Amino acid sequence: MQFELTKEYISELKSCLESNLEADLLKDINLLHPADIADISDELTADEVVLLYQCLSDEVATDVLVELEEDVRERLLKNLSPQEIAENFIDNMDSDDAADIMAEFSDEKKDKVISAIPDTELASDIVDLLHYPEDSAGGLMAKELIKVQINWTLITCLREMRRQAEDIENVYTIYVTDENDKLIGTLSLKKLLLAPNGSTVKDLYFDDVRSAKAYEKSDEIASIMEKYDLVVLPVVDELNRLIGRITIDDIVDVIKEEADKDYQMASGISESVDSTDSVMVLTRARLPWLLIGLLGGIFGALVINQYQETLQIYPEMALFIPLIAAMGGNVGVQSSAIIVQGLANNSLGFDNLFQRLGKEFLVATVNGLVCSVLILIYTILYKDSYDLAATESTALILVIIFAGLFGTFVPLMLDKYKIDPALATGPFITTMNDIVGLFIYFGIGHLMYTWL
Amino acid sequence: MQFELTKEYISELKSCLESNLEADLLKDINLLHPADIADISDELTADEVVLLYQCLSDEVATDVLVELEEDVRERLLKNLSPQEIAENFIDNMDSDDAADIMAEFSDEKKDKVISAIPDTELASDIVDLLHYPEDSAGGLMAKELIKVQINWTLITCLREMRRQAEDIENVYTIYVTDENDKLIGTLSLKKLLLAPNGSTVKDLYFDDVRSAKAYEKSDEIASIMEKYDLVVLPVVDELNRLIGRITIDDIVDVIKEEADKDYQMASGISESVDSTDSVMVLTRARLPWLLIGLLGGIFGALVINQYQETLQIYPEMALFIPLIAAMGGNVGVQSSAIIVQGLANNSLGFDNLFQRLGKEFLVATVNGLVCSVLILIYTILYKDSYDLAATESTALILVIIFAGLFGTFVPLMLDKYKIDPALATGPFITTMNDIVGLFIYFGIGHLMYTWL
C-alpha cells in the first residue's frame, strides 16, 4: 500500500491510541510497509509506541522491529523474556537482521536468547555472524543463499533450489560451488529460464565471479558494489568457501552513512545526529568543535597581542582581520574537501604528494592573485593607503596559498596514518588557517613597519 | 577477473601502447570489467585512450563507452559517423544507457544516429526515453523488462518470459499487467520456482506493488528505493501503464551524487569537481565562493570602520575579532548542516518553524553559555579587564544564538521556496554570520563605552 505520512494522520492515530478504541485505523496499520510503521513510531511518544506495537501482528511486528531506531527497539524489548524475544521475533528474521539486533544485547542476554531460538540452524548462523566486526563483510552478510554444485543436473538443481528457496525472501543469484563448497561461479535465473531440458550446471554456469573476503571493510565492499553495479556480492572465507552474501540495500545504507558522516564532520558535528534528537544530544555533538574553535580564537588573540605595536602604527590593519581569517578558512575547507572526497571515491589517481601539492599551489596562486588584486584596488581606492594595500594583498595571496597547501596536506597525511581524513575538514582546518593567517598578516605588517 | 589498478600496470600499459606492440597485456584488456577499463582510461592521455580503445572487442568497447566520463566519450565518438555510432555501439546497449549517451549529442546528430539504429524497437524506446528530463524517473528508467498478463497460464508465461528475457541482462522481477498493460502486481522468481504445474499467473502473483510515475524526481525515487529496500522499481505513465523500470545501481549513483553535491556546497565548491580535474576547472569551481568571502570580508571591514572610535578606546577588542567571527561561522555551519541533512533524509518530523527555532535556541543557549563563561574566565584571568570580559562574553553568547537561529532559518526558507537548501551552508552562512557577529560585538563594545 502506498502511504504518505501526514500530520493529520499522526494526530488521528494518537487519539485512537489514547482512547484505546478498536479503531479501523489501528487494524489497518498492519497493511502498511514496516518502514512506514517505523517512520510513524518516530513521531510518537515512547508510551504510544508500545501501544501501537500491541496492535501489530507477530509477522509485521518482527519486520518493524528491524526497521526501528536502536533506542526505540531497546525500549520495546526491555520487558520481554529471552524466550519471548527468541520465539516471537528472532526466529522469524533473516540471519543478518537477527545478528544486528542481537549485537545490541548484553553478553548474558545474547546467550540466553540464542539458546532459546527454536530454529537451530538459524541459531548457529547467528553465532557465526556475531563473530565478525559490524563494519566488515561478515558483519553485513546474510547466511541465507541459494547454492548448487557444479556437477548437479538441472533436475537435482531445481529440486535443491526449491528446498533452499523456502527460507529466502529474494533470490538474486544462484551460486555454484565445487564439492568442497568453494565458490566457483554463478548461475543466472535467466539462463535457467532459457535452459533446454537435460542441461547440467556445468553447461550453464558463468565462471567469473567477484567475491568479498569476510574481513574486508564495509566501505571497500561499498565501493566495489558501486563500481561494478552489483546487486548482491558473495562472501567467502580464507579458503574461498562460500559463507554468505551481501545485498545492495545494506550497502546503500553504508554509502549513505559514510557520506552523511563526512558531511557532518566537515560541518563540525562530532556524532551522528539529526534534528529530531534531544537538545542534550545535539549540544553534546556540537560543543566539542565549538570548544576547539574557542581555543583557536584565543590563540588568534595571542597572535594579535604579539603585534600590538604594529597595530598601533597601522590601526587600520584591524579592519581586515576578519577578511584574512575568513579567506584562509574558506580555501582550506575547499582544498581539504576535494582531497577527502577523492579519498572516499578512490579517484585521486596516482599523483604523488608533491604533484598534488604542486597542482594545489597553481590553483591557489590563480585564486590568490584574483582576490589579491581585487583587494589591492579596493584598498587603494577607498582607503587611499599604499602601505595597507601592499600589506593586505601580499598577506592575502600568501594566506590563500598556505591554506590551500595545508588543506591538501593534512587529509593526505591523516589518511596515510589510517586516521579518518574527514577529521581534517571543517572547524579544525578553519581554525588552524585562522591562526596561521593572522601570523602571516601581522608578520607582513610588521615587516612593512620595520622597513618603511 | 578481479583486478587491482597499480602504478606499475599503468606504466607498462603506456609503453605497450606507445610501442604499438601486439602485446599480451593489450589482448588481456578485453578480459577486464568495463568499469576497470574506464578507470584505466582515467590515467591515460587522450591519445593513449584512443589507442587503447582500438584494442577492445566491439562488445567490450560498447560496455566501456557507457562507463567513461562524458568528455572522454565525446573525444572517442567525435570522429565516427552516425552510422558507425548507431551500429557498433548504440545498437548493443540497454535503452537507458543508450538514451543517456544520445542525450549528450547535438539535436542534428541525435536524429542521424537514431535513424541509423538497426533495431527499430530499441530506436523507438530511445526516442521515448529522450522525452523525459534527465533527473526524472523516466530519465533513469530502462524500457527492457519482463511482463506477463494476469490471465496467462504458467506455460504461456514461461514461453513469453523466455522470449522477453533474451534481451535482458538481469531479471529481478516479473511484472504482472492486465490486458490494457496496466501494472497490477509482481510475480517473484521464487514463487515461480516453487509453483506446481498447472498454476496460472492469477494464483501466484502478489498484488501489492510500489511504482513511480514517469515525471517523479530522481531524488524522490532514491528515497523511496532506499526506505523500502527496493532493488528495482517499475515506472508507470499517467494511466498506470507499465513503461519501464529503474534499477538500484542507477539510484546508488543518484544517492552518491546528491550526498557529494551537498558536501561540496558546504565546502564552498560550486560545481562537481574532483582532484584529477584541470587547474582551470578547479579554479573556476572554487573562485565564486572565495569572491563571496572576499566581499564579506570587505563588509566586515566596513563594520569595524564604523566603530573606529570604540576600537580606539578599547584597542584590546581587536584581539578577539577572529574569535567572534569564527564562532559565528562554526555555529551557523553546524545548524544549517543539521537542517540540510534533515531535509535530504526526510527526517525533520512535523515540528513547525517556531518549534524548530525554539529547539535551536535552546541548543545555542547551552553551547553559548559554556563558551561564554570560559571566555569570561580567560579574559578576567589573563587580561585583567572586566569591561573587556563583559563585552566579549555577552557578545559571544548573542553571536552564537544569532548564528544558530540564522543557520536554521535560512535553509528552511530556501527549501520552502524550492531553492536547494545546501546553498545556505558553507561560505554563505559563514560570511553572513561573520558580518553580523562583528556588528553584535562592536555594538556591545560601543554600548559599554557609552554607559561607562
Image: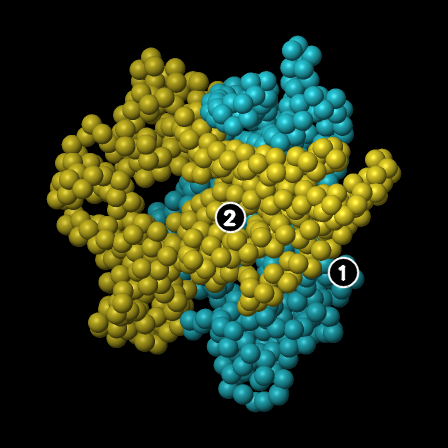
Chain colours: A yellow, B cyan
Relative depth, front residue between B259 and B86? B259
Whole-percent x, y for residue B130 in the image: 67, 54
Residue at x-position 35% and y-position 47%: B203
Which-is-in-front pick, marks 2 and 1?
2
Compute the Cα span from label 2 to label 1. 43 Å
Whole-percent x, y for residue A400 in the image: 67, 49
Whole-percent x, y for residue A347 in the image: 55, 61
Residue at x-position 86% and y-position 37%: A384
Amino acid, disc 1: Ser
Q: Which quadrant holds the N terminus of chain B?
A: bottom left
**In the image, B114: left or right of B335?**
right
Relative depth, front residue between B322 and A82? B322
Q: Which residue is mark 2?
A: A424
Q: Which residue is mark 1?
A: B106
Query: In the structure shown, which secondary structural element does the residue marked by tag 2 occupy?
Result: helix
Looking at the picture, does residue A38 appear above or below residue B350? below
The residue at the far top in this view is B451
Q: Which quadrant holds the C terminus of chain B?
A: top right
The quarter holding residue A273 reads top left
Whole-percent x, y for residue A284 in the image: 42, 31
Callout 2: residue from which chain?
A
